[in-house]
Amino acid sequence: MAVNKSKVAVGFIVAGVLTVVFGTVLSFVGPLIIDDQIVKNTVIDPKNEMSYTMWKDIPVPFFMSVYFFNVLNPQEILKGEKPMVEQRGPYVYRKRCQKDNITFHPNNTVSYREYRQYYFEPSMSAGSESDVVTIPNMLVLGAAVMMENLPYAVRLMISATFKTFKEGPFLTKTVGELMWGYDSGLVDFLNKYLPGMLPSTGKFGLFAEFNNSNTGLFTIFTGQDDIRKVHRVDSWNGLTELSYWRTPQCNMINGTAGQMWPPFMTKETTLPFYSPDACRSMELVYQRPGVMKGIPLYRYVAPKTLFANGTDYAPNEGFCPCRQSGLLNVSSCRHNSPVFISHPHFYNADPVLLDYVQGLSPNEDKHGLFIDIHPQTGVPLNVSIRLQLNLYMKRVSGITETGKISEVVMPMIWFEESGYIDGPILTTFHTNLVVLPAVMEYMQYGFIALGLATILIAALVHHRAKKAHRKATVIFTEDKNLGASRKESIKGSHGHEIQEKSILNNSEK
């Protein structure tokens, strides 16, 4: 019986060794299997039902929250006093994005146009689209700066035109009109006699050209031949570089279209993307790790150099003519209108900008932009892109509408485009990319632990069985020797009796 136990123990030791080997192999092969699955699922391919649908028709609710800087002292500003503003909003719009005209090409790229629509969400807003606010009139104050170098007589004529169409330096309109457009005799006049001067041919509004529009023809890499290139922009509207800026570096179209990035990110990875609305490529940098509903993430934010001027950050020289750091001059792609983009409330900008306007209070949590991304897949989990639209305004002689306005970069609105993964898509994402890899990881350690435990117990059983077997052998040998000695003793005593009998017999005789 002891020998059988020993054989069984040896069998378990072999099984334990095989289990440890399997667990060790799994620890090397498991991550490769997971990575292979990630590659297969992140390639832009109609066969990848979940990821392709997610890319084509973003299932995540996206919102645009708009905040207006309502001007409190328009008459005083015209006298040269410091502007005072109060923030109004948010006015929240649900954003619907859908890709159309999707065409795959033989060189592993795909072309598409992404259409966007906005729907007002009263329940999420701090007011209605009928709220009335006052902001600078871009048509007047923007045009004044654009025309300041024209002959004085021409400027007088422009001023007379403003008066004819009853256009003043400030607009008091409803939020809906300012967002999506309002009727203007001046706009109709300009579109008729100076076509192309204004960005839109219909009503004039800050977001008139955004709604029911597309962001241009993007051609991006599918990642079929190299997963490191997936989502990277190959061309935009047929261009591989821009012509808005003064240096080749600033005119480069870098990174992705800003919705997804290649998988397998590290903390050294950056998030480059091209934004048609900002007319340039931008790049976010790693800030910290985090977790969202059990999913690990990396947070990426805008570096302080993003909107720095050429003096503070030499590579940005191509975006000039620059003003203070924190402002991006987008006049070259906005019909030469003196428009600047910045972070909201001039966050991360030169503090002097805050001195020119009353009512601003920058805060990183409220005004910094960020993207939370799942580093293994390059899929954003939580996004908040915040930008501010500013108008450079000043007194221009000959155009009386400008009064004695002091030179100032005037904030008009800021907006936040935000969205996060939730609901069934989050559950699927969590199961496939967090739970299953974790199960596989626990399995490999489980096999190694089980194998080692089996080896240990079986070795112990084997040792005890051997010990018991040796003990039994010793006892058996001792018993055998004892039996033999007894036999000898019996035999000896029997011989002694015979001898005694023989002596007795001889003596009787």
Image (spheres, helix red, strand yellow):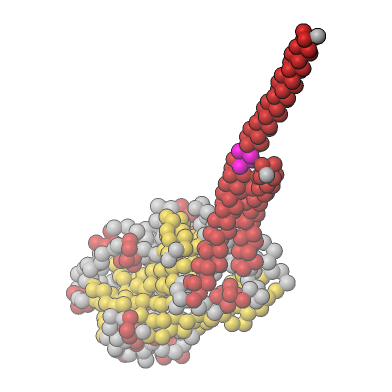
Question: What are the residue bounds of the magenta stretch?
Answer: 461-465
Which residue is depicted at the point 69% across and 69% down? Answer: 108
**Is 236 in front, or is 192?**
236
The percent coordinates of residue 161 (x first, y second) are 34, 86
Rendered image quadrant of residue 367: bottom left
Q: Main secondary structure of the magenta part?
A: helix
Q: Is residue 371 left or right of residue 452?
A: left
Q: Residue furthest front?
A: 509
Rendered image quadrant of residue 262: bottom right
The percent coordinates of residue 349 (x first, y second) are 34, 59
**Is 262 in front, or is 435?**
435
Above or below — where is 442 with respect to 157? above
The percent coordinates of residue 12 (x first, y second) are 66, 48
Magenta segment: does it hold 464?
yes
Which residue is depicted at the point 46% across and 84% down? Answer: 117
Image quadrant for the C terminus? top right
Above or below — where is 408 with respect to 449? below
Image quadrant for the N terminus? top right
Using the rendered image of the protein, determine whether residue 47 is visible from the camera's viewpoint: yes
**Is 22 in front, or is 369?**
22
Which residue is depicted at the point 63% across and 32% down? Answer: 471
Using the rendered image of the protein, determine whether residue 140 is visible from the camera's viewpoint: no
